[in-house]
Amino acid sequence: MEKRYLIRRLEASDCKDVITNYYTYFKELKDNPTFGLTLYRKKPSYKSELAWFRSLQKDIKKDAIFVSVAEVNGKVVGLCEVRCERKGSESDHIGTLGIAIIKRYRGIGIGRALMEDIINKSKNKYEMLKLAVFSNNISAERLYIDLGFKRYGLLKNSIKRKGRYFSEDLMYLNLRHLQKKRAR
């Protein structure tokens, strides 16, 4: 397994890799119904994914979202993003974070590297980051806690997948607190 990777900004040329990666999560879900990523009930068309990617690129240009990718041997294998959930509202100081890494590249440090990169990019824009993680995704939750995230709640039965319910732990990271700790 190749363990060398590059963390960088998302580029327009990454479109095919990002969409291909997203489609692998649907296959993983078939093999593992407890897979901890929220997906659409049906795999979206390639055309709709292209439209989503174009929209993502526009949001990046408007500085409405930060997106970092992990690249191994010229291919994107992971993506991490943070976006303002409600721009122009009294909660626009909070960024919502999401991360996804294709299966064979998990557990080698890519998730940590992506998270650290996106947290650093977020410090000048947000005061707090939040995320939701499937309660059964112990390794991801351990990583988030190690990076300073704190649990603030549990959303029981938040995901309904093929008649089965999954809960999510809600977590946040106070970026202002991190900056004060480092200044000491």
Image (tube, helix red, strand yellow):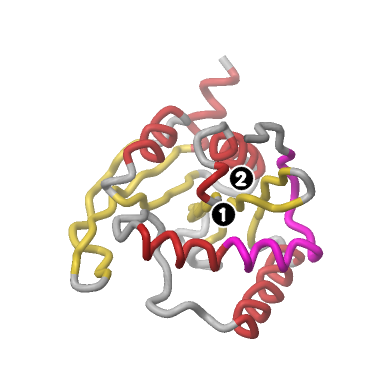
| Residue topped by disc 2 | 122
Q: Nearer the viewer, mark 2 or mark 1?
A: 1
Mark closest to the chain's N terminus, 2 or 1: 1
Asked if 160 appears above or below 111 in the picture, the reply is below
| Residue topped by disc 1 | 82
Asked if 133 appears above or below 45 in the picture, the reply is above
In which quadrant is the C terminus drawn?
A: top right
Assess whether residue 13 is covered by the magenta stretch: yes
What residue lies at 51% left-to-right and 59% top-to-bottom? Answer: 92
What residue lies at 30% left-to-right and 40% top-to-bottom? Answer: 151
Amino acid on which the number 1 mark rests in the picture = Val
Assess whether residue 82 is covered by the magenta stretch: no
What residue lies at 72% left-to-right and 43% top-to-bottom? Answer: 72
What residue lies at 71% left-to-right and 63% top-to-bottom? Answer: 60
Drawn side of residue 152 relative to residue 76, left or right: left
Where in the figure is residue 3, as x and y percent of width and height? 65, 32
**Tag 1: Cα neighbours inside 10 Å, few (<14), some, or many (≥20)?**
many
| Label 1 secondary element | strand
**Is residue 19 or residue 184 the one in the foreground?**
19
Magenta residues, start to end: 6-21
Where in the figure is residue 68, as x and y percent of width and height? 67, 50
